[in-house]
Every structure is written in C-alpha cells, then in structure tokens.
Amino acid sequence: MRLLFAAGVMLASMMMPRPGYALSADEVVSKANLAAFYAGDDGRSQARMIIVDAQGRKQTRQFTLLRRTLEPGGDQQMLVFFSRPSDVRGTVFRVEKKVSRDDDRWLYLPGLDLLKRISAGDKRTSFVGSHFFYEDVSGRNLAEDNFTLESETDNHYQIGATPKDPDGVEFSAYRVWIDKQTWLPSKVEYRDHQGQTYRRVETIKVETIDGYPTVLRSKISDLNSGGYTLMEFRGVHYNLGLPESLFSERSMRQPPVKYLK
C-alpha cells in the first residue's frame, strides 16, 4: 500500500558493509523495500489524491487500491480503481510487477473502452495528472540503482542512490532517509543533472495497522513549479485472501464490486 515511495526504496547490487556501520546499504534498502511494498500477503485501501498546481488550483482523485504479493520481495499484482471525479470514474490501472524484467502496466479508459499498455519509456510520466509517476505506483526495479550508506543517526539511515543508466531517467541522483523504527522512508529528495534538488517525497502520517507500519498521509512536491500532490489513505486492511484470478483484464472491464467496498 505504499505506492508513494516507490523510487526511494529499491535494492541494488550487493555491497560489503562499510566500516563503522552495522548494516550495509543493500541491507537497509532491502528492509525498507519489504516494509514499504510487502506488508502482508495482500492488501486493500481507499485513497484520495489532492493535486495542487503552481497557482493553487486543486483537483482530487479517489480510488481503491488492491495489491497481492506472489513472493516477499518479489513479483506482485496490483489494481487501482478510480471512482471520483466523474471524468476518471471507471478508469483502472493494473500492474504486474516483475523483479527480473520491466513491469507490465495497463490503463483502462472506460469512455473509449480502450485498454492501453503503458510502455517502459513512459514509466516516469505523470500518473493521472498527479505529481506521482507510473513508476512510483508499482516501484522501481530493484537493480536499476547503486546505493551508498552515507550516514546513520539514532533515528535514520541516510542512503544515497544513483541510476545505473543515467540517460534513461530524468534524475541524476536521489537521497533517502529511512526511519529505523518503522523501516519506512521518511523523506526522498531527487537531484537533476545540474545537481539541483527538484522533487521531494515526504511522509506526514504513519500508523500501525494489523501489525504493519503504514503510511496514511504523504506529499510529493515539484520544487521547480511549486505544485504538489497530497496522498491520503483510509480503510487499510491486510491479509484478505485476495485471489490471483482477481488481477486480470476482465476485472479492469468489470470491476469486482465485492472487493472494492
């Protein structure tokens, strides 16, 4: 249920522990990855996005998120059903998350009865007009970045990350602060190719639900434009026994009402 921190918690190639630190960067990122994306065997939540542009104009998006884990730290299935406002009602986003290759992503547009595949090249573009990217929803491939444990305090690990293919993304690096108690990222900052911080992800509210620390409110900011998106979750539940057959093209065209309540 932690779609908002996708880019900040990915596992890269194995690294030896640095002198003075009890854990290596890959160990810290691995724990954060599990905490942020793999709570429970599956999960459901209701969510609202409040999108604010540079002029202060607001839009909202409401949706239900269903997620099923095939293997902890491994492949996952995800469905996002939009209910409000009316112009996005019935829109469905589906992800088949693959750790060994690019994820499969589709967007169903009910007004056109169109099932659109999201190409790998579009994964870092806006998700339904928000400041989230498609990749933020399903997560960045675990092997696409190199990680360094930069510092450690009583409360946080500070991780630095650089992409292995810098020409394939809009950022040159990012930094993640991971909470030692919850293992959730509390902040992520992205730098552009000029070294300027241009994007920030912040955790605002965390509660423990069914034994799992869960982000209930977060914010993504575009520091260049001044716009931002707030994400709020409610009705979060884990370990519901969601069937594998639920995560299909059929469910995109005929939403499974019993699982959306």
Image: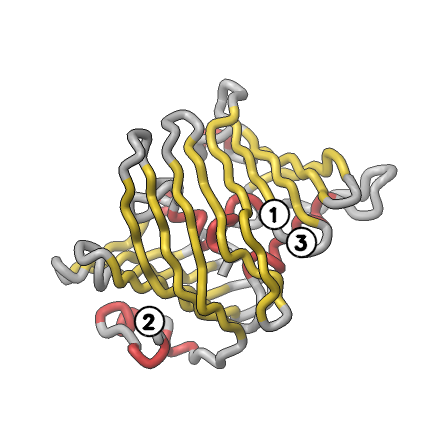
The residue under the point 42% across, 51% down is: 231
Label at residue 161: none
* Residue to which mark 1 is pinned: 185
User: Does dot 1 land on a helix, a strand or a loop?
Assistant: strand
Residue 97 shows in this picture: yes
Give left or right: position of 115 versus 189.
left
| Residue at left offset 59%, top offset 61% | 207
* Image x and y of residue 169, in percent: 45, 34
Instruction: Please provide percent x and percent y for residue 86.
Output: 18, 58
- Amino acid type, mark 1: Pro
Disc 2 crowd, CA 10 A, few/some/many (<14, 14-19, 20+): some
Whole-Å distance between the Cαs marked 1 and 3? 7 Å
Q: Disc 2 marks which residue? A: 248
Separation of disc 2 and disc 3 at Cα? Answer: 31 Å
* Residue lying at the far right of the rendered structure: 20
Q: Which residue is mark 3?
A: 183
Total numbered labels placed on residues in the image: 3
Disc nearest the viewer among 2 and 3: 3
| Between discs 2 and 3, the one toward the N terminus | 3
Q: Is residue 73 left or right of residue 118?
A: right
Q: What residue is shown at x 82% (from left), y 38% (from top)?
A: 18
Viewer-nearest residue: 233 or 242: 233
Instruction: Identify the residue shown where x is 35% and y is 76%.
Output: 261
The answer, for residue 140, to whether it is visible in the render is no
**Coordinates of residue 99 in the picture (x, y in percent):** 53, 57
Q: Amino acid at mark 2?
A: Ser
